[in-house]
């Protein structure tokens, strides 16, 4: 037996002698405690005699003070009150947490956290499941993706040009669409940009914006640039009206246009774009998008979403975008969530029937006016 164990064993015998005047029941209870202590001494006596001081914190002395009492040679009835019989009840065992890392794991007298009662520790958070883990792509924005360095540089230069053109009238510049939703695909996607100004712009200002930003003067690395200018009042109004100052489409993969008002059959796009910006927009300059764009109520957007699908029925019924937009519209109305179109390909593949039949079913559901589920 080690010197440490001999010392503590001697103190244990002295302790027992000082409480022999207790009743038989108390002696049995005390004997059980001593047996537990002797078993601990047999396993790791050196750790118990580490000499650490009491601090009564997590990782400090044992909360019921049994070990300091024994080590200090004090009588148990002076530190631990002896209770009466349990009246036929089974003692309740305190549940212990699993072992955890401890910087001083050998110092049992410091009360290793691995044996600390659960109610002495800070509550453990729920363990994350695999399905709770968010993909890195959803956390790191596209601006940090090396595959879109050209687009990032383009957007930075675009902001600089707008600041030069508009000066203090510029409120902010915001990326929407697939860039904001995390579904941008180099070579396939457009860059959707919203520009917010303090007041309505004159025709000559709109012309200068077009001349400075059109593809021939400022090549767009994406399929195209779709840029819309709104006044601050329009952006802050939860309306489905287009109410834009300028709608510019330019790029190698899109047809050039520069409109000052919405064309027939195209009024529906702008309220949807502002709805995405309100919830997911990316500020390229200016205040946060949520402080600039008012979200449009889902039930107010329902007719606009149905009109978008009707546009695809007329203009591009066999395109992949037709079905993906159907899925995105239904998901938003059912759950209030905007998804990028690539995330809906699995949904589209699972739909029975032709594109026309899928569009017809989606339009019927939107027109039914069912409340959001």
Image (cartoon, rainbow, N blue to C red):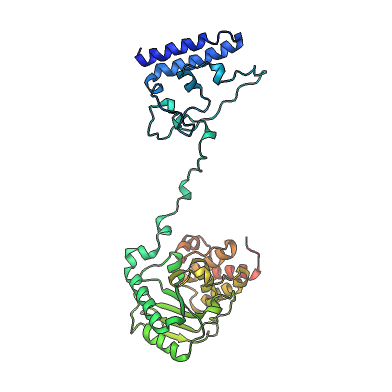
- Quadrant where the image shows the C terminus: bottom right
To which quarter of the image does residue 146 belong?
A: bottom left
User: Could you tell whether 335 is left or right of 3 in the image?
Assistant: right
In front of the other: 225 or 36: 36
Residue 33 position within the rendered picture, expressed as x and y whole percent measured from the top left: 52, 16
Q: What quarter of the picture does the N terminus occupy?
A: top left
Task: Work out whether residue 324 or residue 72 is closer to the camera in this orientation and state it.
Answer: 72
The answer to whether residue 168 is seen in the rendering is yes
Q: Is residue 194 visible?
A: no
- Drawn side of residue 132 relative to residue 84, left or right: left
How many labels were placed on the picture? 0
Q: Is residue 259 above or below residue 362?
A: below
- Give the vertical position of 199 relative to 345 (above or below): below
Q: Nearer the viewer, residue 1 or 268?
A: 1
Give percent across and percent down for residue 196. Answer: 48, 78
Q: Furthest residue to the bottom? A: 204
Name the spot of residue 325 as percent of width and height, x first: 51, 69
Q: Residue at x 42, y 89 (%)?
A: 207
The structure residue drawn at horizontal position 47% and vertical position 45%, both measured from the top left corner, is 129
Query: Residue 165, how many percent across, how many down?
Result: 40, 84
Indicate whether 334 appears above or below 189.
above
Give the residue drawn at x 50%, y 84%: 245
């Amino acid at each position: 037996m080690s010197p440490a164990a001999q010392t503590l064993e001697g103190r244990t015998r002295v302790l027992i002698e000082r409480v022999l005047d207790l009743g038989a029941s108390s002696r049995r209870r005390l004997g059980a405690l001593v047996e537990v202590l002797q078993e601990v001494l047999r396993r790791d006596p050196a750790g118990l005699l580490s000499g650490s001081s009491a601090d009564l914190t997590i990782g400090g002395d044992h909360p019921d003070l049994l070990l300091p009492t024994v080590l200090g040679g004090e009588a148990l009835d002076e530190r631990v009150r002896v209770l009466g019989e349990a009246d036929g009840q089974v003692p309740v065992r305190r549940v212990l947490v699993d072992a955890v890392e401890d910087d001083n794991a050998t110092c049992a007298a410091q009360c290793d956290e691995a044996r600390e009662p659960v109610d002495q520790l800070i509550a453990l958070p729920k363990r994350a499941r695999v399905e709770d883990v968010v993909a890195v792509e959803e956390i790191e924005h596209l601006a940090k993706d090396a595959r879109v360095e050209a687009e990032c540089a383009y957007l930075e230069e675009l902001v600089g040009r707008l600041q030069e053109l508009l000066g203090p009238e510029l409120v902010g510049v915001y990326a929407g669409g697939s860039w904001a939703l995390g579904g941008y695909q180099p070579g396939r996607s457009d860059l959707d940009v919203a520009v917010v100004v303090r007041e309505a712009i004159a025709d000559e200002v709109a012309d200068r914006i077009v001349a400075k930003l059109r593809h021939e003067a400022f090549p767009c690395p994406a399929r195209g640039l779709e840029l819309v200018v709104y006044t601050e009042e329009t952006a802050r109004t939860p309306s489905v009206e287009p109410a834009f100052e300028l709608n510019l489409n330019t790029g190698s993969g899109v047809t050039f246009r520069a409109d000052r008002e919405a064309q027939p059959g195209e009024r529906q796009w702008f309220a949807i774009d502002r709805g995405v910006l309100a919830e997911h927009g990316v500020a390229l300059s200016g205040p946060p998008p949520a402080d600039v764009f008012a979200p449009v109520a889902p039930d107010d957007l329902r007719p606009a979403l149905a009109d978008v699908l009707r546009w695809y029925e007329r203009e591009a019924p066999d395109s992949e975008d037709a079905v993906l937009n159907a899925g995105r519209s239904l998901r938003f109305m059912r759950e209030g969530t905007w998804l990028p179109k690539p995330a809906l390909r699995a949904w589209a593949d699972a739909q029975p029937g032709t594109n026309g039949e899928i569009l017809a079913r989606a339009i019927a559901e939107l027109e039914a006016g069912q409340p959001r589920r």
